[in-house]
Image (tube, rainbow, N blue to C red):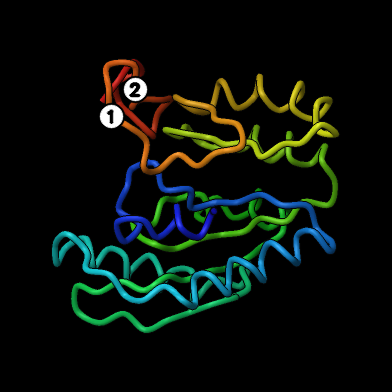
Amino acid sequence: GWAGSLTMGAGQFCTNPGIAVVEDGPAGDAFVAAAKEALSASGPQVMLTDGIAQAYRDGKDRFDTRNSVTPVLTTEQEGRNASPNLYETSAENYLQDHALGEEVFGPLGLVVRVSDPAQMVDLAKGFEGQLTATMHLDDGDAELARKLLPVLERKAGRVMANGFPTGVEVCDAMVHGGPYPASTNFGAT
């Protein structure tokens, strides 16, 4: 699921789902526990370049020093190897600390907890431009989807439902663009 998508290719896919938004409560707790377990089982992977590996370490260090996040899983990074790291925060903290939305290229995940589904819409309105956004829905989420989808369509080049954005087939129909700062070309990159 999410952890596999986050760590695919050492998290170096442009469509890496680095932020997951979940409702606070038992379901959110279960998501974080499952993500931690899956990420803990994932070993280090080699980053593409020394510079990318250093940027990942720098991004992880920024999260480690923030009071607005809680570490769930932190690992040591060595050389060009990158191991997954997981943090969580509240929607309120995310909206106040804009640096939390800055991409960390690599297998670093941030879980943002919302108090209710309506807060997901408010949170989405605060997102910067993204290449992708994904909604995981079931039959009971139709009303939320009707409110969230128009926001995500303006924030992401591609919106998916019940899937993960990494590992997709590259073809002529692929959208690899989105609003700034995800892309400087609105149509494609």
Q: Is residue 57 left or right of residue 108?
A: left
- Three-letter amino acid code at disc 1? Val
Count of residue discs: 2
What residue did someone put label 1 on?
A: 170
- Three-letter amino acid code at disc 2? Met
In front of the other: 182 or 31: 31
Q: Residue at x 23, y 67 (%)?
A: 53
Horizontal and vertical percent position of residue 165 = 45, 39
Q: CA distance from mark 2 to mark 1?
A: 6 Å
Q: On screen, 66 above or below 107?
A: below
Q: On screen, 33 above or below 13?
A: below
Q: Secondary structure at mark 1?
A: loop
Horizontal and vertical percent position of residue 186 = 36, 18
Specify the quadrant of the image occupied by residue 69: bottom right
Q: Residue at x 46, y 58 (%)?
A: 4
What residue did someone put label 2 on?
A: 174
